[in-house]
Amino acid sequence: MPQITVDHPAHFSASFDRRGFALALHPVVVEIAGAKLPACKTRFRTTEDNVIGDETDGPGILAIEIALLAGRTDEVKKQLATAVAELAGKYAVGTPVAGHVSVEVRDLDASYSKA
C-alpha cells in the first residue's frame, strides 16, 4: 500500500521521466495521504493505442490510479488527485498530454493481501 499504476502511450517513453516522477510522487502520497514511504509502489504500463474523441493522431493519455487502504476522506483523495495531476505535468515534459491527464484515488478492496 499504496499501489500506484501509471498508464502512458508508448511514444511517451523517451520524454516522460518515469523514475523521476515516481520518486517525486511517493513523498506527496506520504504527506497528503499519510502513507509510509517504503510502502509506496509505482508501476508503469505502456499502452499501444490511444484515441480521444475523433482524433486519430492526437495527444496521448496519461492515466494514474492510486489505490490506498480504506480510511481516507473524499477530501484527502481529491487533494491527492489534484497534487498528482499537477506533478505529472512537470515530469511529462515534451509529451502532448495537455488536458489528458487523469488521476483516480480509490480504496483497495477489503480482500487486498500481500505476502
Image (spheres, grey):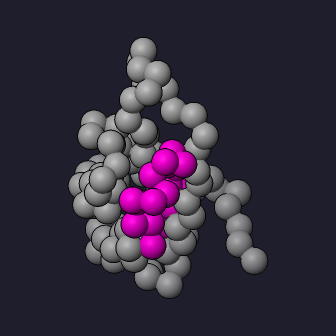
Residue placed furthest toward the bottom: 38
**Residue drawn at (29%, 57%) of the image:** 93
Q: Answer yes or no: is residue 62 visible.
A: yes
Find residue 54 and report its image quarter: top left
Q: Is residue 112 left or right of residue 14?
A: right
Residue placed furthest toward the right: 115
**Residue drawn at (49%, 74%) of the image:** 40
Tell me if residue 6 is in the magenta stretch.
yes
* Rendered location of residue 27, percent (x, y): 34, 77
**Residue drawn at (25%, 60%) of the image:** 90
Image position of 68 with respect to 53: above or below: below
Q: In this view, does 64 lie to the left or right of 93?
A: right
Image position of 58 with respect to 115: above or below: above
Magenta part of the protein: which range?
2-19
Image position of 112 with respect to 23: above or below: above
* Rendered location of residue 99, percent (x, y): 28, 36
- Nearest the viewer among 84 and 95 is 95
* Rendered location of residue 95, percent (x, y): 34, 49
Q: Answer yes or no: is residue 69 visible.
A: no
**Residue drawn at (49%, 26%) of the image:** 51
* Rendered location of residue 43, percent (x, y): 57, 64
Q: Which quarter shows the C terminus? A: bottom right
Residue placed furthest toward the top: 54
Q: Which quarter shows the N terminus? A: bottom right
Tell me if residue 80 is in the magenta stretch.
no
